Image (cartoon, rainbow, N blue to C red):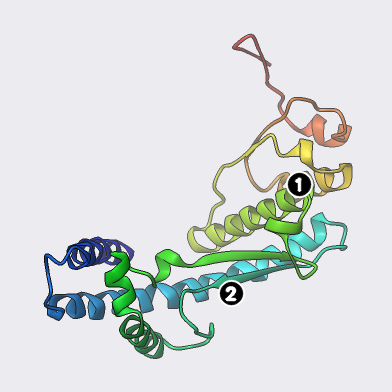
Amino acid sequence: HLGQYQKILKQRNHLLKQMQRRKVKDKTMLRVLTEQLSAHAATILERRFNFLELLRQWASPIHHGISRELEQLEIKYSPSIEVLEDTNKEKIETIYLEKFHEIEEKEIERGTTLAGPHRDDLLFYVNQKNVQIYGSQGQQRTTALSVKLAEIELIYNEVGEYPILLLDDVLSELDDYRQSHLLNTIQGKVQTFVSTTSVDGINHETLNKAELFRIKNGNVET
């Protein structure tokens, strides 16, 4: 559905650009594309809502643990239409059709599609504050890691094995407790490569169980 959505979106945007330039005046083709786009958009949105519910079930407790149970993570979906997450696909499609009818003239004026899953966003809140705006670097990093670890669990549930995890210089922005909890969470379960400029602050037990590679002047030393 995503591939079809993107294909129709591209066609619709091209048509809107033509209509903006007065090269096309008849709206018949626009409304055909709108119906097709709305159908695919509804399926995508319904699946996103289902995935988000699973993601929350893992990410929130993971974040709670890494933050020493001091922070509560909330993940909110910000759609380009007014819709509740438990709305069924047929109703979502109707809402999209109504939205596109409402903004049709504005879209022609702008020459682009102004609603749909491609204009949606994910918002992350820590203790009810938008972490992208008000969060510290440590909170932002913890949020990103919590979501990544949640995705790994979802992949495991789907295919029966964990993927390889790559963490690039994440430890420098975490305090000692968050570092230790993060490493304990993945240790022995997920094959992980962690890059860091210093191993100071990482507890010795964790280091002893890991294989260390040092890169010096472009050469790898074990």
Relative height, residue 40 to residue 61 (above, below): below
- Relative placement, left or right, of 205 versus 53 is right
Residue that carries the numbered disc 1 in the rendered image = 137
Q: Marks 1 and 2, how far apart in space? A: 26 Å
Q: Nearer the viewer, mark 1 or mark 2?
A: 1
Q: Residue at x 14, y 76 (%)?
A: 29
The amino acid type, in three-letter code, at marker 1 is Gln
Number of residue marks: 2
The amino acid type, in three-letter code, at marker 2 is Glu
Check disc 2 and report its element: helix, strand or loop. Answer: helix
Q: Image quadrant of residue 173?
A: top right
Q: In this orientation, which residue lies closer to the viewer: 147 or 211? A: 147
Q: In this orientation, which residue lies closer to the viewer: 196 or 13? A: 13
Check disc 1 and report its element: helix, strand or loop. Answer: helix
Q: Residue at x 11, y 65 (%)?
A: 23
Q: Image quadrant of residue 153?
A: bottom right
Relative height, residue 73 to residue 212 (above, below): below
Q: In this orientation, which residue lies closer to the viewer: 141 or 99? A: 99
Of the residues under marks 1 and 2, which one precedes in the sequence? Answer: 2
**Image quarter hosting the N terminus:** bottom left
Residue that carries the numbered disc 2 in the rendered image = 53
Please rate how many residues cluster around mark 2, counting C-alpha atoms within 10 Å: few if below 14, some from 14 to 19, many from 20: some
Evaluate whether residue 54 shows in this view. yes
Evaluate whether residue 1 shows in this view. no
Q: Residue at x 31, y 85 (%)?
A: 101
Relative height, residue 96 to residue 202 (above, below): below
Residue 93 point in image, percent of width and height: 35, 85
